[in-house]
Amino acid sequence: MIKLFFFSMLILLFLNGCNSSNTKEDIFQSEGSYVGDNSAVGNIAHQLPGGEHLEGFELKTKEKPYGIILNYNWIEAEKKYKETVIYNATFLFTLVQNADWITFNFDNQRYKVTKEDLQNWYGKRLSEYTSEEELRKLTQKYIEDENKVNELFK
């Protein structure tokens, strides 16, 4: 009986180990993606805040400057939209190397951000960042300052 119990426990531990995978992929695995890579851009966008509300997206690649349009089915406060735009644009511009602009369409609000404007706002080149943690710290620092946030959206 004891052998059967230990054998059962061993099987359960083995099966649990096989099934336990980190469901949240490292977003920086998509670093170096291009606007034309539909699956990479979609994967990144779905991992970012509000990703569960993303209804669809368009990639504008016919002529430069290249851009991304993200369409959300999400009713939130304007402050939350602005924070989401800053955070998501920062990650997308860092990971999608040829993205020049991104338009965020929410149910009742639209924001367009260019890579150049965002980098000027930060005072830093986004290509310098190589990890999710570094980028998260950067965005958090700036998002906490409401005056700074409003400066970007003038």
Image (cartoon, grey):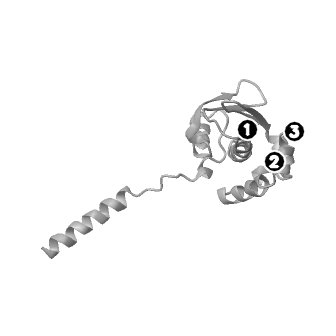
Of tags 1 and 2, which is closer to the observer? 2
> Dot 1, how many residues are within 10 Å of its Cα: few (below 14), some (14-19), or many (20+)?
many
Q: Going 69% across and 56% down the picture, which residue do you hit?
A: 136
Q: Is residue 8 left or right of residue 142?
A: left
Q: CA distance from mark 3 to mark 2?
A: 9 Å
Residue where numbered disc 2 is placed = 149
Q: Disc 1 on helix, strand or loop?
A: loop
Residue 112 coordinates in the image, percent (x, y): 77, 34
Residue where numbered disc 1 is placed = 98
> Dot 3, how many residues are within 10 Å of its Cα: few (below 14), some (14-19), or many (20+)?
few
Taking the view exactly as shown, the residue that stands out farthest to the front is 77
Q: Going 65% across and 56% down the picture, which residue do you hit?
A: 132
Q: Is residue 113 left or right of residue 130?
A: right
* 35 vs 9, nearest the viewer: 9
Q: Disc 3 on helix, strand or loop?
A: loop
Q: Going 59% across and 40% down the picture, which residue do you hit?
A: 40
Q: Mark 3 or mark 1, which is nearer the start of the sequence? A: 1
